[in-house]
């Protein structure tokens, strides 16, 4: 895919053809690069790389992130439109090309990565500055045309006006006459307008992807098709790390329509004219696998017991993730200490669209069509696995049928690289079955956590020591960055800190390396770290006879944003109001991704399992770009967390996943869905992350309600089969 | 060779009789609105209408639809009911990743068709419990179905 602006204005090629863009420096820092724009074609105008303005006053905005349901395809352009003073009804949106130099996320070092709730967070300032810069360039066009000072020209709703002379022109008219001498001024964040002047941010822009997704017309990766395409299915090693040693493909090759059988380092692929044929033939392969992988010794139930034992060795030093004050001294001086151990099992991402990728090799070039969270990581995979030079790799990102962290990985792209290389000139589309997806889930880490809290004689928490034992994610995925950071495994330890006023805090990670690849999941670490923190806060409240809400308000007395969401959710749920017999409320709070979320759930018990009837959440994520979408994300991520706590568990025996499809791995269904009310409270702060923010508080809130109903403290994810 | 009606036209599928209908629709007829999710009738992403009733196409051999009337989301969207449901889906901004929504809409059509009276949220959620949505759009689906039924009555 080429930039429309590039192809129509040729401004990256040809003499004197340069561009103006918001680009990213080598350290991912914002660097507004200014240059004159090309004059070879006066039709459209691209004052910044993100926008193309047509003479008919239509504006195309490129949206950089992978759209996987989080809505940033719409919200990122809305941010730019705000400061560009665009008429939103004139805006159309396209996924940006995978050009990291132009469109990379500063919060990922300038890479094209969508994840960790960092899209709005990372692009917010870039988009606002780009919008402002584009607006000022257009003002300069009008000022020049009218021979008036630029500061007398006002831009509003895609129209430029000069009040004194009563003249006006649309952005489109300005675009048509923007010559090569247009001045594109430097901008900085002090020039941005205040929140009180927002017209688009804070409104509910309808999502641009919703109509096609409401009529079956949206194309996902699995729907990508180019002439001559063939399909592939891969038989993978049952245990990660093994190799095919002997392959009998006689029966597979006898299936009509099979084109090729390709042996991969980790499996055997069948390429055929249709996927139905490829899968049928794949299932007929007879493969003998090696039996040397370290992963064979991995048994998740056994590992969990060993992790628990290690977590409870409080004297063992871990890798420090977060530290405040002197926890050892605080615990030593405490009037009493409390401790508890929490565990979480592996869980699978279960994107509804199974992993897939299409690739085609032509000479030394490769082109991808792929539903991935990261064009940069697909590029890196093609370079590492296929030996392609980065400049010869083109990545087209389609809609993603769910991501939840799984599509940050690029193992499906590796399949496609091997197969496309084996069949040069032919587009090969590899598709995983659901069973393949479970077999290679790369699940959320198995964890054991031990917390020791020290209380003074008034019951105040003075020390908090939390140890998390788990396999690493960054330690495997990006070992260099992991080591450089001083063994900080960010996704594993996400949420293992708190804004609570506790003088001594220590959060540590004890790295395990058992040979099973674990990976990103919705919310990753915060799903279990906040579970432990927030469930244990309620245990402290119980031990010190405090109301859980009052305790949290006391712990956040210097945190007005936290106080506000706690008070708001208490009002929404009528926290103090008695519930009917058999029902109880539970509360939890999360400060992860610099968004403040307080959540209350109403729960009853049925045959030893919690039934959640209602979820209330109050959210302060700063500037709230699209409140309705934010509420949907909070609700969706809360239901994701609810699904996990109720019944999700991926068990490994002998290194092999024991659950193979949805009949053995239970996801939340429609008839288990509680009512959900979310209140978004915009504040004048930089945006926080939202795509995952509803997940961390849900499990502890339910556990805290269950404790009220049963007197039992749940400390495991998922919850026990019978409480 | 299996003959059936597909979105109002008589068609012949020239594939092995045991080929799942899902793949015939997607690969021979290029009707990619119907999605592959699990391959064992657990998630509902592949739901189509057979003789007007929602069915899972991923486990149905194409031979089973011989002489039957098959409607996919593409065909259903041409109907008055389809258009009403689509509009309700857009108004409720149901979709997130959107991958399961074709199947949700095809199942919703069945829930509305088989309803004995005005649908409640709970009735819709019960009726839709065969269709998984990993993004958690069930509440929005429920309100869209209730609204679509009102619009159609």
Image (cartoon, grey):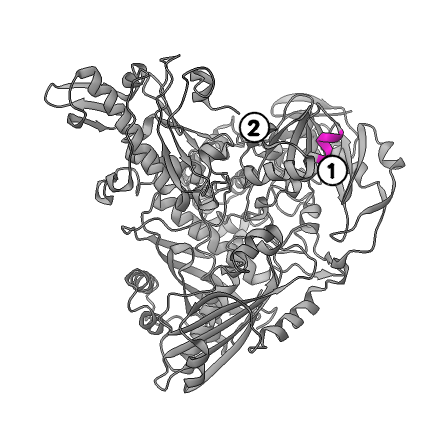
Instruction: Tell me the residue that label 1 is attached to.
Output: A233
| Residue stretch rendered in magenta on the structure | A418-422
Looking at the picture, how far across and down is residue A559, in whole percent? 30, 64
Q: How crowded is mark 2: few (under 14 residues within 10 Å), some or many (20 or more)?
A: some
Task: Mark yes or no: residue B153 visible.
Answer: no
Return the chain for callout 1. Answer: A
Q: Does the stretch in magenta take in A493?
A: no
Element under disc 2: helix
Whether residue A244 is visible to the viewer of this picture, yes or no, is: yes
Q: Position of residue A169 (x, y in %)?
A: 23, 18
Q: Is residue A421 highlighted in magenta?
A: yes
Camera-side residue of A195 and A574: A195
Instruction: Locate residue A538 relative to residue B50 in the image: left or right.
Output: left
Q: Mark 2 lies on which chain?
A: B
Quadrant position of residue B61: top right
Task: Give the residue drawn at x 32%, y 38%.
Answer: A128
Residue A368 as seen in the image, left or right of residue A66: right
Q: Please, is residue A539 above or below residue A214 in the view?
A: below
Q: Mark 2 points at which residue?
A: B74
Q: At 44% from the left edge and 52% from the top edge, which residue is drawn?
A: A635
In the structure shown, which secondary structural element does the residue marked by tag 1 occupy? strand
User: Looking at the magenta stretch, what is its main secondary structure?
Assistant: helix
The percent coordinates of residue A261 (x first, y second) are 81, 34
From mark 1 to mark 2, how far is it between C-alphas? 27 Å
Estimate the x, y position of residue B115 in percent, counting from the top left.
51, 44
- Label 1: few (<14), some (14–19) or many (≥20) C-alpha neighbours in 10 Å: many
Foreground pick, A3 / B119: A3
């Amino acid at each position: 895919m080429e930039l429309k602006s590039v192809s129509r204005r040729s401004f990256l090629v040809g003499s004197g053809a340069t561009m103006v863009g918001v680009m990213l420096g080598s350290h991912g820092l914002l660097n507004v690069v200014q240059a004159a724009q090309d004059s070879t074609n006066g039709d459209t105008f691209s004052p910044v790389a993100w926008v193309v303005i047509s003479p008919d006053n239509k504006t195309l905005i490129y949206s950089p992130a992978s759209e996987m349901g989080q809505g940033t395809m719409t919200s990122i352009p809305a941010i730019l439109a705000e400061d560009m003073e665009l008429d939103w009804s004139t805006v159309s949106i396209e996924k940006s090309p995978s050009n990291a130099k132009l469109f990379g996320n500063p919060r990922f070092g300038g890479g094209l990565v969508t994840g960790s709730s960092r899209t709005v967070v990372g692009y917010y300032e870039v988009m606002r500055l780009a919008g402002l810069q584009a607006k000022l360039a257009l003002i300069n066009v009008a000022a020049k045309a009218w021979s008036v000072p630029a500061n007398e020209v006002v831009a509003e709703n895609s129209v430029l006006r000069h009040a004194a002379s009563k003249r006006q022109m649309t952005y489109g008219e300005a675009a048509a006459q923007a010559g090569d001498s247009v001045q594109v001024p430097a901008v900085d964040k002090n020039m941005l307008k205040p929140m009180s002047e927002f017209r688009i941010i804070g409104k509910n822009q309808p999502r641009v992807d919703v109509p096609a997704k409401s009529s079956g017309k949206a194309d996902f990766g699995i729907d990508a098709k180019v002439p001559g395409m063939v399909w592939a299915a891969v038989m993978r090693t049952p245990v990660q790390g093994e190799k095919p040693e002997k392959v009998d493909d006689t029966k597979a090759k006898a299936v009509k329509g099979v084109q090729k059988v390709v042996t991969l380092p980790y499996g055997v692929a069948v390429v055929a004219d249709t996927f139905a044929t490829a899968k049928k033939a794949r299932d007929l392969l007879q493969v003998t696998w090696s039996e040397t992988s370290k992963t064979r010794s991995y048994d998740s139930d056994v590992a969990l017991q060993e992790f628990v034992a290690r977590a409870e060795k409080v004297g063992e030093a871990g890798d420090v993730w977060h530290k405040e004050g002197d926890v050892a001294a605080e615990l030593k001086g405490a009037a009493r200490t409390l401790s508890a151990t929490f565990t979480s099992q592996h869980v699978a991402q279960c994107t509804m669209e199974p992993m897939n990728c299409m690739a085609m090799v032509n000479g030394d070039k490769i082109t991808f069509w792929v539903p991935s969270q990261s064009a940069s990581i697909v590029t890196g995979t093609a370079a590492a696995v296929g030996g392609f030079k980065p400049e010869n790799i083109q990545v087209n990102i389609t809609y993603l049928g769910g991501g939840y962290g799984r599509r940050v990985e690029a193992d499906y792209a590796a399949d496609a690289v091997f197969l496309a290389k084996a069949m040069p000139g032919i587009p090969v589309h590899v598709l995983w079955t659901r069973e393949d997806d479970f077999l290679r889930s790369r699940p959320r880490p198995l964890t054991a956590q031990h917390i020791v809290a020290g209380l003074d004689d008034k019951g105040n928490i003075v020390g908090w020591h939390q140890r998390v034992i788990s396999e690493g994610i960054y330690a495997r995925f990006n070992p260099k960055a992991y080591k450089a950071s001083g063994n900080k495994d960010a996704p594993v330890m996400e949420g293992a800190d708190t804004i609570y006023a506790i003088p001594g805090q220590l959060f540590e990670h004890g790295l395990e390396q058992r040979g099973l690849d674990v990976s990103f999941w919705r919310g990753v670490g915060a799903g279990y770290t906040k579970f432990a923190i927030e469930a244990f806060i309620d245990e402290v409240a119980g031990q010190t006879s405090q109301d859980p809400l009052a305790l949290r308000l006391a712990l956040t007395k210097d945190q007005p944003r936290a106080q506000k969401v706690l008070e708001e959710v208490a009002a929404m749920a009528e926290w103090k109001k008695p519930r009917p017999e058999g029902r109880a409320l539970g509360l939890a709070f999360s400060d992860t991704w610099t968004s403040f979320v307080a959540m209350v759930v109403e729960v009853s018990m049925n045959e030893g399992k919690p039934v959640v009837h209602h979820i209330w959440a109050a959210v302060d994520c700063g500037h709230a770009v699209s409140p309705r979408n934010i509420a949907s994300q909070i609700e969706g991520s809360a239901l994701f967390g609810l699904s996990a706590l109720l019944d999700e568990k991926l068990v490994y025996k002998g290194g092999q996943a024991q659950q193979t499809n949805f009949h053995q791995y239970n996801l939340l269904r429609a008839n288990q869905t509680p009512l959900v009310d979310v209140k978004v409270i915009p504040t004048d702060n930089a945006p926080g992350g939202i795509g995952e923010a509803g997940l961390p508080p849900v499990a502890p809130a339910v556990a805290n309600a269950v404790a009220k109903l049963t007197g039992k403290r749940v400390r495991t994810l998922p919850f026990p089969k019978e409480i | 060779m299996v003959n059936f009606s597909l979105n109002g036209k008589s068609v012949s599928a020239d594939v092995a009789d045991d080929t799942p209908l899902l793949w015939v629709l997607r690969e021979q007829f290029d009707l990619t609105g119907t999605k592959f999710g699990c391959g064992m009738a657990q998630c509902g992403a592949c739901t189509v209408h057979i003789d007007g009733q929602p069915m899972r196409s991923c486990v149905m051999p194409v031979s089973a639809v011989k002489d039957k009337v098959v409607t996919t989301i593409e065909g259903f969207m041409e109907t008055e009911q389809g258009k009403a449901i689509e509009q309700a889906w857009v108004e409720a901004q149901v979709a997130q990743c959107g991958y399961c929504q074709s199947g949700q809409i095809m199942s919703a059509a069945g829930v509305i068709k088989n309803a004995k009276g005005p649908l409640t949220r709970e009735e819709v959620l019960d009726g839709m419990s065969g269709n998984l949505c990993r993004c958690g759009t069930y509440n929005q689906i429920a309100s869209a179905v209730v609204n679509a039924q009102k619009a159609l009555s």
